[in-house]
Image (cartoon, helix red, strand yellow):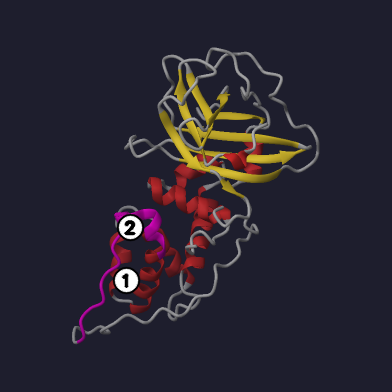
Amino acid sequence: MSRIDSLPADQKAVLQLLLKRGSRYEELSGLLRIDAAEVRRRAHGALQALGPDDAPGLSPGRREQISDYLLGQQTGDQPAATRGFLEGSAGGRAWARSVSDELRELAGDRLPEVPPDQEAGDGAPATAAAAPARSGPRASRRGGAILLAGLLVAAVAVVLVFVVRDSDEGGGDTTPTAAKRTTEAQQPQVVAQANLMPPTSRKGSKALGVVLIQRAAGQQQLVAAVQGLTKPKSGGYGIWLYSGPNREKWLGFFASQDDEGRLLARGELKEAVGDYREILVTREAKGNPADPGPIFLRGPIQRAGSGGG
């Protein structure tokens, strides 16, 4: 298991959204409905956990600066200034290179370059300071909470219409009896999540989504929020549980939209989520399709406490 897989779920999910999609703190702030400073704090916490426990001569402020650089969040003259600092700091290069190596599985070759160590005789050390041995990732301040569980529940607490057993027309006004509002005071327990991103076939798409599967009042519920999908001329966007051809389950259409264009859904989920591998968001012409239509978002189902988030 990689060190990223060992991160608390909230930190890991933010890294996935930042690096795989090239998103900015402000974009995730809009999706997750928390301020950009909180998104940045979670991202910095993840990189701090992935980096060496000890970084002699590297202040917390410098680590934050390097973190923003590695995550592609700096603008204007900031990247050049950070690179200039790294060129003159062996300790900074060692920390940045160690973190960069851990992030590569998510970002591939999209990470910014860490300046190479200068040759001996050029007025700089021949090699960077060796990275100290690392212990396991530090615990999140939120205790490894599943990605913004309470936030997403709040985001759809008032607009609850999820067509679990829908009509024949996408996005219709019919509210199924299976779609219920949780009125009990019991705190929902999140049991799984899926971070949704466009498939590789949809290059350039900035759409994002988060799905939570939670248990409350003896009922398993699905809560979903997506943004960035263009309104179709007909039909609508729906949700599937999926494990491969002939191993899929149609759940229904998104049937609510907030003032900022985000599609929201929540409803009872009677299927055993452990029988499926991922969640798809597809565009469908009508309800109860036999097979998934064009895929616009997809993401693996990650069970709470499984190490995968």
Q: Which residues are magenta?
A: 102-120
Could you tell me the amino acid type at mark 1? Leu
Label 2 residue SS: loop
| Foreground residue among 4 and 88 | 4
Task: Tell me if mark 1 has few (under 14), some (14-19) or many (20+) residues whose alpha carbon lies within 10 angstroms of its own.
Answer: many
Question: Which residue is label 1 attached to?
Answer: 86
Query: Mark 1 and mark 2 in contact (Cβ < 8 Å)?
Result: no
Could you tell me the amino acid type at mark 2? Leu
Label 1 residue SS: helix
How far across and how far down the image is residue 173, in percent?
60, 13
Question: In this orientation, does residue 72 appear?
Answer: no
Q: Is residue 119 magenta?
A: yes
Q: Residue at x 51, y 67 (%)?
A: 49
| Foreground residue among 37 and 252 | 252
How far across and how far down the image is residue 243, in percent?
50, 38
Task: Tell me if mark 2 has few (under 14), some (14-19) or many (20+) residues whose alpha carbon lies within 10 angstroms of its own.
Answer: some
Q: Is residue 307 magenta?
A: no
Q: Distance of mark 2 from mark 1, alpha carbons? A: 15 Å
Q: Is residue 232 left or right of residue 159?
A: left
Q: Which mark, residue 111?
A: 2
How far across and how far down the image is residue 148, in percent?
60, 46
